[in-house]
Amino acid sequence: MSVRLQPGTNTITSGYISADGKAVGTDELEIDVKIPALPLPHISAKVDGRDLVLKVDSYRLSGSDLIHNWDLTQISRRFIITDSGDKSQIRLSPKGIVSGQFEIGLQVRAGQHISERAIFHFTYDKGEPQVPDVMRDHPDWIDSAVVYGVVPFLFGDPPFKSVTQRLPYLHDLGVNAIWLSPINATLPGDFGYAVVDYFKLREDYGTEEDFRDLVKTAHSLGIKVLMDFVPNHTSSQHPYFLDTQKHGKFSHYYDFYMYDSSGNYQYYFDWAHLPNLNYDNPEVRAWMMRAFTYWVREYDVDGFRVDVAWGIRERRPDFWPQWREELKSVKPDLFLLAEASARDPYYFTHGFDAAYDWTEELGHWAWERVFNLESMVVWRLRDALTNFGQGYHEDALIFRFINNNDTGERFISKYGLPYTKLAATLLLTLPGVPCIYTGDEVGAEYEPYSAEGPISWEDKYGLKSLYQKLIALRRNEPAIHSRKWMLLDTDPQSKVLAYTRFSNSQDSWFLVALNFSSEDLVCRINLPKDDMKLRTVSTPRLILGHPGKMEIESSHINLSLGAYEAKILAF
């Protein structure tokens, strides 16, 4: 008989049956499938006038007799296609004035082995070819993305099916992407960051079919699916690490891990149960490449939140660009998020689309100390939002949140309902990628690492309508989901934070004003002299907040704000 093996550890059990049909005995065989024989082919592109020349980097493939199989189905009617003798290079010449986005697939055969399928996307605009910058360009859908952080076991039991059942609810809320907390095989009772198999799902969440159904249902609703992936370390109970403990330096996997000068395995913080992987070992790099691409190919996931991305940056900074290039060859519109500080420009030039709203200190939320003292909230927020006036890299895309898996007690439990409403307004009107975490929109109160069972979805604080309104505004208005914004001077400056949201392509703009004090007041908001032209022909449209006094002058706006009120105006 034949058995299909999957990447990772495969356990095969055989049994013996006597003539009377009784099982006499069983035996088990473990077979570990490592890295596929061929790497992913890479397609490079060059613009030659109105032609596009595509070339395969064959140095990445082994063998002298390579056969290149291009999938030109989508473009054959729009382009004249010529190729080199071995088809390692093709030239696309447009038939007339061509516009649109196009896709080409490629597989390479070397002997009996066929490579994985690479995909290349390109655009023609009125006959002119445009080649994507793989390292800097990000998918268009990210511009208006609203991510929902999903802890599957808090949705119900079984978790995968429970998440699938609630996807229409998330669609109605307005989110267009979900970030699943770790779903790879892990230890019983673990949140998921102690991975024991990168190619298998955790059994307590459901079956492979359950997860396929989750992804398929999400996609049918226009919701992307992001996995939380853990490439920095394995569990100390991973079969590879256990093998090193048993056989020491004689283990094939000994060099998969890092050691100090005394021969002790290395780890971060107090994570003794999470040994660091050795990214100087090319087999480790190939293993992780295949682990990432496996979930894209087999399950069609749409991106990754990469746990401890900063750790691999410290040890092997050239890995992430290679990783991005590989993943983008599989699915160009993936979203790649680093668990690392957005204040470090490295991540936006070395492989990632977005990074966390952290300070320079690992794991420290930029808003962590903002809300502790009412008289200092606005000053601290201005510092946090501007990186103390130093700004961010031009390509920086900040992943923002008020709760996530590491923030412990929920924001509403720490700071109460008035601040929660203001923080939610900030989250969904600032530049970046906002993340709503499990139950934020209904004021759920729990701590992720110690929570048990499903949360209550009762909207006991009446927050859901606010979230729906803000999400719809963000999704529908280019000015709100653009990267363009400007902090404004206010009086009183210690109580009101105000900023504009605008885009290059529209004349309309928005004013967001937030009163962080417990008193009603009239605030003067100073407008920039040269950066914006007010529409004086009509009164601005009130998007959020209560009607009240508003006086518009060429240099400023006098605006009434109630205690802890958020007001949004469209001009």
Image: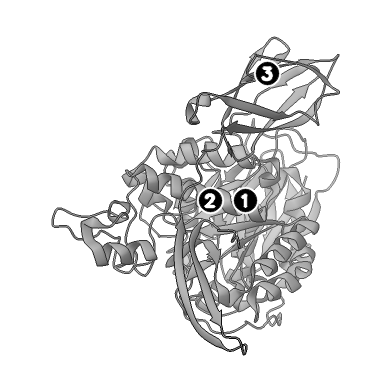
Would you say residue 262 is visible in this rendering? yes
**What label sits on residue 546 in the rendered view?**
none
The type of residue carrying mark 2 is Phe
Rounded to the nearest angstrom, the CA distance separating label 3 from label 2 is 29 Å
Taking the spot 50% from the left edge, 31% from the top edge, the residue there is: 61
> Which residue, given by chain and number where applicable, does mark 3 sit on?
90
Q: Nearer the viewer, mark 1 or mark 3?
A: 3
- Local secondary structure at mark 1: helix
> Which residue, given by chain and number where applicable, does mark 2 sit on?
292
Rounded to the nearest angstrom, the CA distance separating label 2 from label 1 is 7 Å
The type of residue carrying mark 1 is Val
- Local secondary structure at mark 3: strand
Q: Could you say which is closer to the camera, residue 41 or residue 230?
A: 41
Q: Neighbour class for label 2 at 10 Å: few (<14), some, many (≥20)?
A: many
Q: Could you say which is closer to the camera, residue 375 or residue 321?
A: 321
The answer to whether residue 428 is above or below residue 352 is below
Q: Residue 432: horizontal and vertical position, in percent?
A: 59, 48
Specify the farthest residue to the left.
262
Q: Nearer the viewer, mark 3 or mark 2?
A: 3
The answer to whether residue 413 is above or below residue 355 is below
- Local secondary structure at mark 2: helix
> Which residue, given by chain and number where applicable, does mark 1 sit on?
296
Rounded to the nearest angstrom, the CA distance separating label 1 from label 3 is 27 Å
